Amino acid sequence: MAKPAFKRILLKISGEALMGSQSYGIDLAVLDLVAGEIADTAKMGVEVAVVVGGGNIFRGVSESARGMDRASADYVGMLATVMNAVSLQEAVERHGVVTRVQSAIPMQQLAEPYIRRRAIRHLEKGRVVIFGAGTGNPFFTTDTAAALRAMEIGAEILLKATKVDGVYDKDPRKHPEARRYETVTFTDALKQDLGVMDATAFALCRDNAMRIIVFDMTTRGNIQRVVCGEHVGTTIVKDDKQTRFAMTKGAAT
């Protein structure tokens, strides 16, 4: 494996990705696969921070749409992310890498409180840090939490791990002719409403020139390939005169 191209990364994992083929909860085989990928990346000397969603257990937006108070629904969703974070911590440590969970909502029996300097110190010591409970505030998604934490800890790249192998011009599940972008600028992604992240998270990354790579986490070794600089998935890049119209599309898959 080549030398890592990044020293510190923020990995965003959706809760739905942990379900596997189930309709609810955590698929332990998928959890172990993801944990192994994270552990292998950390063993390469890369400082790995993780934000995990909670959609496999509870989705605040969906429940609020069905009549539940949005703030209450979001808080329950934050608790779901902590459940995933603690589960992921245990799985990563089974692969031999020391891991810490930090929660934006205090719950000292399960996790450390989120403290930026402490998180950075853990990373410097080679520990994986998993951030739970989103931002600690309702009305913000875990995408926004991932963007925010990436800025706070000084991550070099934000990796969005999904079940899809990149960003497409159309939904590939509905349109077989959809084509995948290799590279796209923030402006073009917004204009075409490509749905990379929610608007708040995307704007935060754009304004702070934080590159995003969207890739398929179900392919073994993909995290290491991305970290080593191989072109995997779709990269969202800063707008400038060279890249503004330099979107390239890969073959349909």
Image (cartoon, rainbow, N blue to C red):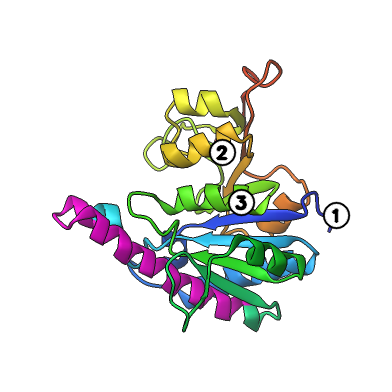
**Which three-letter amino acid code belongs to the residue tagged 1?**
Ala
Discs 1/2, front: 2
Q: Residue furthest left?
A: 67
**In this view, the mark in front (2 or 3):** 3
Q: Nearer the viewer, mark 1 or mark 3?
A: 3
Left or right, 82 with reference to 160 = left
Tell which of 250 and 105 is nearer to you.
105
Q: Secondary structure at mark 3?
A: helix
State the residue in front, 132 or 162. Answer: 132
Q: Secondary structure at mark 1?
A: loop
Image quadrant holding the N terminus, namely bottom right
What residue is disc 2 on?
Answer: 205
Task: Note whether 152 is above or below 87 in the view shown.
Answer: above
Q: Residues within 10 Å of mark 1 (few under 14, many from 20)?
A: few
Is residue 32 among the parts visible in the rendering? Answer: yes
Q: Which residues are magenta?
A: 63-92
Spatial separation of the CA atoms under disc 1 and disc 3: 28 Å
Disc 2 crowd, CA 10 A, few/some/many (<14, 14-19, 20+): many
Q: Earlier in the sequence, mark 2 or mark 3?
A: 3
